[in-house]
Image (cartoon, rainbow, N blue to C red):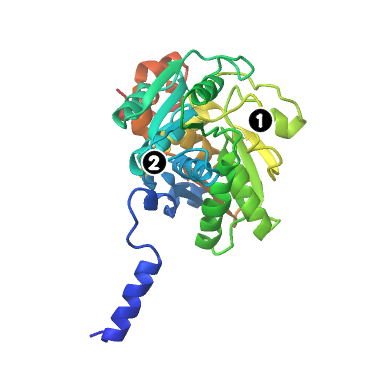
Amino acid sequence: MLSRQILQKITIRCFANDAIRKGLIGMVGRTPLVRINKLSDETGCEILAKAEFCNGGGSVKDRAALFLIKDAEEKRLIRPGGTIVEGTAGNTGIGLAHMCLALRYKCVIYMPNNQSQEKIDMLKTLGADVRPVPVVPWDDPDNYNHQARRFAESVENAVWTNQFDNTANKKAHIETTGPEIWEETRGKVNAVVFGTGTGGTLAGVGTYLKDKNPNVQVFLADPEGSVLFNYIKHGKLERTPGSSITEGIGQGRVTKNLAGAPIDDALAIKDKDAVEMTFRLLHEEGFFVGASTGLNVSAAAQVAKLMGPGHTIVTCLCDTGQRYYAKLFSRSVLQERGLLDCIPESYRSSLH
């Protein structure tokens, strides 16, 4: 039997490693790093992914959401009982809504009206005041972000958290995601690759890891219709052809979170590859995820082929597929978009 002293040491070590999390806020970060088995075996690389759906609010955006609120509190921009306002395509809003319930704030979300109904319904269930608005470019005064800012300015004790240009977003990944990846790979990470919306994850993780080892390669994975691939490759803000089925990633500008990020290269990922990988992850690995995750992992596989066997490549599983069920897992929607044929016949049993 173990001695009382040894048992006490084990107990102290468990608590020191946060074996018991302190509420929902304590469930942000320290997500598992998982191996994507079949792709790793196929490429000869270790393709690893942070399981970000294990955060308290169910996505990678929980990290940014918490840091955005903490930033507002530290700057005394909001007082107890105030209102958090954001313009978001979904997951940041869901993360903010969860944090607002835990921290006793009200939550108002402006979002493009082309987002999945599942996300809208979830936000409402979480008590957020959801305001879908027509999709217009960033430079239009009626862009959902500008409407969010104006509303926050018109309300007493309210703050617009400004996820795209508030670098507290990037800070979340400099202080949590980057260190976790470094620690969990024991410093043996060779490359990271992420799709980018606000730029916080890619910039934050890249900044931290480059500081630890300048040889770590940082890749941006860009969906169809975004400007970032051409910006990184050619220095031009020109959109690639198409309009992606992915949500929450891709951009028409360089955000303050992304500006100056230490990016080595960019990959343009077609929807057919992102969707095929989404269904591969489901049927070959058991992960029920969305198309942004499919894009991430498809890009990681491409990076593995570029770098060759023996390397460790890290990305993330952004959230669960349930948030996209009506669209991404719809036979008719995929048929209309010309994406049905990219899914192996044997995997189409998951469609409705």
Mark 1 residue type? Leu
User: Does residue 121 lie above or below 207 as drawn?
Assistant: above
* Disc 1 residue crowd, few under 14, some 14–19, many 20+, Cα 10 Å: many
Q: Is residue 305 left or right of residue 322?
A: right
N-term-proximal mark, 2 vs 1: 2
Q: In this view, does 253 lie to the left or right of 60?
A: right
The residue positioned 59% from the left and 49% from the top of the image is 205
Residue 124 visible = yes
* Disc 2 residue crowd, few under 14, some 14–19, many 20+, Cα 10 Å: many
- Name the element at disc 2: helix
x and y percent of residue 283 in the render? 36, 39
Residue 45 visible = no
Quarter holding the N terminus is bottom left
User: Does residue 352 lie above or below 285 as drawn?
Assistant: above
Q: Which residue has dot 1 on it? A: 228
The residue positioned 32% from the left and 51% from the top of the image is 23
x and y percent of residue 58 in the render? 37, 41
- Name the element at disc 1: helix
Residue that protrudes farthest toward the front in the picture: 156
Query: Is 273 in front, or is 61?
Result: 61
The residue positioned 62% from the left and 54% from the top of the image is 208
x and y percent of residue 257 in the render? 63, 38
Q: Which residue has dot 2 on it? A: 99
Mark 2 residue type? Met
User: Does residue 291 lie above or below 47 as drawn?
Assistant: above
Q: In this view, does 263 lie to the left or right of 183?
A: right
* Quadrant position of residue 300: top right
x and y percent of residue 227 in the render? 66, 26
Mark nearer the viewer, 2 or 1: 2
Query: Is 82 in front, or is 64?
Result: 82
Query: Is 310 in front, or is 292?
Result: 292
User: Does residue 273 lie above or below 28 as drawn?
Assistant: above
